[in-house]
Amino acid sequence: MKNIIRVALLVVAAASIGTMAWGFEADKASTETLWKLPQGERIAEDQKRQGPHYANRMKFFYEDNKKAEPGCIVFLGDSITEGFPIEAAFNGHLPKDAPRKVVNRGISGDHLEGMIERVDVCVRDLKPSKVYIMGGTNDLWWFRKDYKEGEVKDGIRRLVRRVREVAPKGCEIYVQSILPINHKEEPSKSWDSYTEWVGKANKQLKEVVKEENVHLVDTNKALSDEKGYFIPRFTLDGVHVTPIGYLRWIDELLPVGPEKEQVWKNLAKFWDTNLGSNYKITGVNKIRWEDDLIKYDNKCTSTTTGTNVYGYEVLVENDKVTSVSGTGNMPIPKKANACVLSGHGKAAAWLKAKADVGAKVKIDGKTVEVTPSDESLNNARREAGKDYYYEACRREWMALTVAGKDVEKYYPQVEKIRETGDDAAGKALLLELQKIGAEK
């Protein structure tokens, strides 16, 4: 297997060198061809060159640009940005017909040259006041055409300069560092060098930020542990971000104050819908597709779920979660009182957030209900460490907001727990918030 991997990498590297020989992929495509095409032809060309998802996102961007507010804020990136609930976070309090203040211009699988290629539609046409860039993950992860093994400096510089070139004068540019990986979540040992490459890439990224006089948002530091790995509760599959991870990201983007409080309120409503105690099962003993939650039980004819690593699975025995897997393809139990719940996308995020080991599970027809146990709460507390009471108080504050409780005065206190790390104060505040929640 190792030899096969080495040969594959050499082939990819050779292809990359061949591409580099004539120049960067985006050079001719964007400035001489793609940018001049009418919308329909551009989308058709995108489909041919980049695939249906890329083309569908570009089609959406063309239409969505009409709804954006002049001077809006743009988040430009790949799947990590595409998965950011930006609409809910920043526009959730706005009337449906109001111009949008913040827009998401992430495309899953995109790379630095792809972002350079589409800054006409994703930056120029929007006339933004701020642009937040996150790119480079796929260049490192998938050995894309132009950059590899942490050597992304030229790509980041090119992207920053192209954004500045097409954006209005005075537009602020923020470069967000490349996120880490978590080896426990990602099963392929062939990517062991990725953490080293990310470190090198982020060092180069900081050099570009300084040279180009733009802003840095150190998202990597915010989401990494002391070894440089993705903190488990912040990552869904070792690469992508969980809902609580996006909240941690927002901690880096916004200072304590009314704007951040409003974002919390917006996301409270969003996550009450998507991360409540109940979730609908979309199928039983079937192939898992996008955003599915599939139940596999002893009536399944397969020995394993057959799923890939882009999901999250839990084993339920006697109405209790006994093990979890971020790598998929769990064995299917043959006992009548056991099953595997397998989620992808939104369903995977729900399982990751709710169904920790020890949690109690009730499956009623096509609905799963999860209740945390003392064991699962203790596991969560150990993992969160010094951030436990901050995250617990924030979660309780958001839940009370959705319930219509008047808890605005507690927002600064919750933020103070993060600042001070005072466990005693955090515990007291959590108990006070829980008491409010228990009141009728």
Image (cartoon, grey):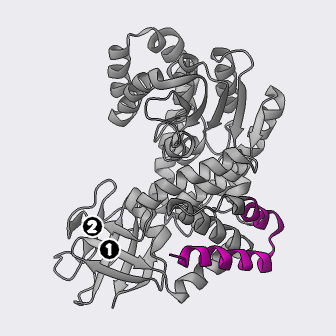
Badge 1 amino acid: Val
Q: CA distance from mark 2 to mark 1?
A: 7 Å
Vertically, is 166 above or below 54? Answer: above
Residue type, mark 2 in image: Ile
Say which residue label 1 marks. Answer: 368
Magenta span includes 39: no
Question: Total number of numbered labels?
Answer: 2
What is the residue that sits farthest to the front in this orientation? 440
| Residue 236, percent from left and from top | 50, 61
Residue 151 seen from this side: yes
Q: Is residue 122 left or right of residue 274?
A: right
What residue did someone put label 2 on? 281
Magenta region, residue range: 412-440
Q: Are marks 2 and 1 in contact (CB under 8 Å)?
A: yes
Dot 2: element: loop
Can you give x and y, in whole percent of width and height, for residue 81 in the image? 54, 43
> Which quarter of the figure is the N terminus placed in?
bottom left
The residue nearer to you, when weighing 152 against 134, is 134
Q: For the point 44% across and 77% down, which residue is it?
A: 324
Residue at disc 1, secondary structure = strand
Q: Is residue 418 magenta?
A: yes
Above or below: residue 67 compared with residue 89: above
Q: Is residue 198 visible?
A: no
Q: Residue 285's spot in the image, x, y percent? A: 20, 70
* Chief SS of the magenta region: helix
